[in-house]
């Protein structure tokens, strides 16, 4: 089956939207669609018509036609099934089948068409999977929005702080003037005849500014002398409170800071590398001229009797090129594990060639004459899985509490690495304990400790890999309620990719020469529980 194009046209043969899956000129597709209405037989219920070159498989859509143009050797039954899926997608995304709504949602429809057919071949997807792919959320976008909101809140707080500081300086200036203090331009400046919102002065460092300020005793004196108290009845409560605290509080909190706006001395935060504790004990990665960062985020809920309630895996691949001579490259990924099916959905950057996960698995720009940006990370590929396939569970946990006749419970918990292509670092398995009871550990691998904040036993394993893939812990504790030991929570930082996304080679587009590259692939746990 080869689908040459999928189009929505009027009954006169004018294209509303059209997506070509093989190399075809615009004039060619317009010509085919213009001749299509003339070929439709009258008085029949057939949904296909042929010419000497192509076959039209069509379905009426109110005042429009949805048409698949295929070669004559394609399977007509598969073509009709594909046509029905196209029609369901159009009905799902548009409120009506009018030309106005089709044009309004044209971009989303073309994206959905690409999910159904790739290079002329039908993808094994259904309507729900197409909808999930189109609604894929961007984790990076959420992070950027959070950062922007935080910066906006910090700027507002800084403005409030500066306004409060200037108000306190103004009140101190009035207090000193009313107390008969020197009107000269001391630390506050401006004298009694005027007020400068931001005192202007030159300084080289904060230290000389502090030494140039009036002595604490001179600021504090008006608050306690009789001459300064005569006008106290006309002051506000805030001013009286400042007087009671004395000048030392002002010096220590506000007046010791430079009088120039804080914006001039507080640069905007810049992106920095992740702290070492976020990577835990993961080994550092030396970045080559072509550096690929793979991040996956895992959330799952296992059932104590066996099975899986839900699992969600999200991942993205970021490409950063620091070598200007290696910007025109293509990335070849290693073959996917055979156990992973079409439920794992991929989405590529709009400027990147469509990624075929079940074929060559190459990431390259659509326009081969263009280059990737230099020193700018670019998210070239994303993927997502949501379902109950236990193939994606990296670590199985078996917690088996057994009540005894003496009012205690013997607990045996063991783990086993299921995904041997990844390594798990800094693994912590937390088992809740019954209230008021403390465990007696009889045997264990790794290390264990009591967590007083959650009253749980934290079992720590530094590294789990294909060589050290299993371990167990046995302990006894007071209480006979087996449900008290759940939910078991797991935390770790993984090295590798659960979805099997791994870089095999990087080659130049021009001559096919291999380029040195580096890869940093990690898995972060958002939620990992056994209930």
Image (cartoon, rainbow, N blue to C red):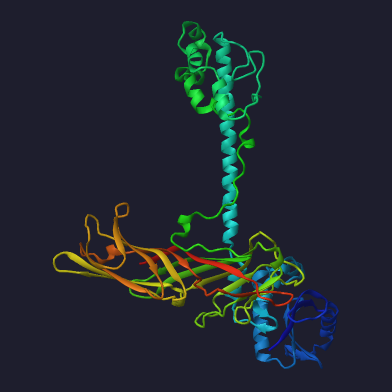
Q: Which of 58 and 28 is in front in this view?
A: 28
Q: In the rendered view, does 355 fall on the left or right side of 475? A: right
Q: Which of 238 and 15 is in front in this view?
A: 238
Q: In the rendered view, does 7 fall on the left or right side of 438? A: right
Image vertical order of residue 378 relative to residue 2, above or below: above
Instruction: Give the residue at x 70% y 65%.
Output: 372
Q: Going by the picture, which residue comes out furthest to the left? A: 406
Residue 335, position in %: x, y? 56, 80
Determine the image quadrant of residue 21.
bottom right
Residue 286, position in %: x, y? 55, 63
Quadrant holding the C terminus:
bottom left
Q: Answer yes or no: is residue 67 visible.
A: no
Quadrant holding the N terminus:
bottom right
Q: Answer yes or no: is residue 204 visible.
A: yes
Instruction: Give the residue at x 50% y 6%.
Output: 227
Instruction: Give the residue at x 57% y 55%.
Output: 143
Image vertical order of residue 228 relative to residue 195, above or below: above
Tally of numbered tags:
0
Instruction: Give the residue at x 39% y 75%.
Output: 467
Image vertical order of residue 369 relative to residue 158, above or below: below
Determine the image quadrant of residue 431.
bottom left
Residue 377, position in %: x, y? 63, 61
Q: Which of 114 and 79 is in front in this view?
A: 114
Residue 328, position in %: x, y? 71, 69
Q: Nearer the viewer, residue 88 or 404?
A: 404
């Amino acid at each position: 089956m080869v689908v040459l194009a999928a189009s929505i046209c009027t009954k006169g043969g004018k294209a509303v939207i059209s997506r070509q899956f093989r190399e075809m000129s615009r004039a060619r597709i317009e010509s085919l669609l213009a001749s299509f209405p003339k070929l439709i037989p009258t008085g029949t219920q057939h949904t296909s018509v042929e010419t000497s070159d192509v076959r039209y498989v069509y379905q009426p859509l109110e005042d429009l036609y949805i048409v698949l143009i295929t070669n004559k050797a394609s399977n007509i039954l598969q073509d009709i099934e594909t046509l029905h899926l196209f029609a369901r997608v159009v009905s799902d995304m548009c409120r009506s089948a009018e030309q106005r709504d089709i044009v309004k949602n044209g971009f989303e429809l073309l994206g959905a068409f690409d999910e159904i057919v790739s290079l002329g071949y039908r993808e094994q997807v259904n309507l729900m999977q197409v909808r999930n792919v189109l609604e894929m959320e961007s984790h990076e976008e959420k992070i950027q929005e959070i950062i922007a909101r935080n910066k906006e809140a910090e700027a507002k707080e800084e403005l409030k702080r500066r306004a409060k500081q200037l108000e306190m300086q103004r009140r101190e200036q009035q207090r000193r003037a009313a107390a008969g203090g020197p009107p000269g331009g001391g630390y506050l400046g401006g004298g009694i005849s005027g007020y400068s919102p931001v005192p202007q002065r030159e300084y080289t460092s904060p230290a000389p500014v502090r030494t140039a300020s009036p002595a604490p005793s001179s600021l504090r004196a008006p608050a306690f002398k009789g001459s300064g108290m005569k006008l106290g009845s006309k002051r506000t409560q805030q001013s009286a409170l400042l007087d009671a605290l004395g000048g030392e509080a002002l010096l220590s909190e506000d007046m010791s800071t430079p009088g120039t706006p804080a914006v001039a001395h507080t640069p905007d935060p810049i992106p920095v590398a992740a702290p070492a504790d976020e990577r835990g004990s993961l080994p550092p990665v030396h970045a080559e001229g072509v550096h690929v960062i793979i991040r996956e985020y895992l959330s799952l809920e296992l059932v104590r009797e066996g099975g899986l309630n839900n699992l969600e895996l999200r991942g993205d691949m970021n490409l950063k090129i620091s070598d200007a001579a290696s910007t025109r490259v293509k990335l070849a990924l290693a073959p996917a594990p055979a156990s992973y099916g079409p439920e794992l959905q991929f989405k590529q950057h709009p400027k990147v060639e469509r990624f075929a996960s079940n074929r060559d698995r190459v990431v390259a720009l659509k326009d081969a004459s263009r280059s990737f940006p230099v020193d700018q990370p670019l998210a070239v590929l994303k993927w997502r899985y949501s379902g109950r396939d236990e193939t994606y569970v990296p670590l199985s946990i078996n917690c088996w509490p057994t009540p005894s006749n003496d009012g205690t419970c013997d607990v045996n918990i063991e783990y086993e690495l299921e995904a041997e292509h990844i390594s798990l670092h800094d693994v912590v398995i937390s088992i809740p304990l019954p209230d008021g009871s403390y465990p007696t550990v009889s045997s264990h691998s790794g290390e264990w400790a009591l967590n007083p904040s959650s009253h749980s036993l934290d079992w720590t394993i530094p590294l789990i890999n294909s060589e050290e893939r299993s371990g167990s812990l046995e302990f006894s504790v007071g209480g006979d309620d087996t449900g008290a030991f759940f939910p078991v929570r797991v935390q770790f930082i993984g090295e590798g990719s659960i979805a099997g996304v791994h870089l095999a080679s990087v080659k130049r587009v021009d001559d096919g020469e291999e380029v040195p590259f580096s890869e940093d692939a990690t898995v972060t746990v958002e939620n990992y529980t056994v209930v």
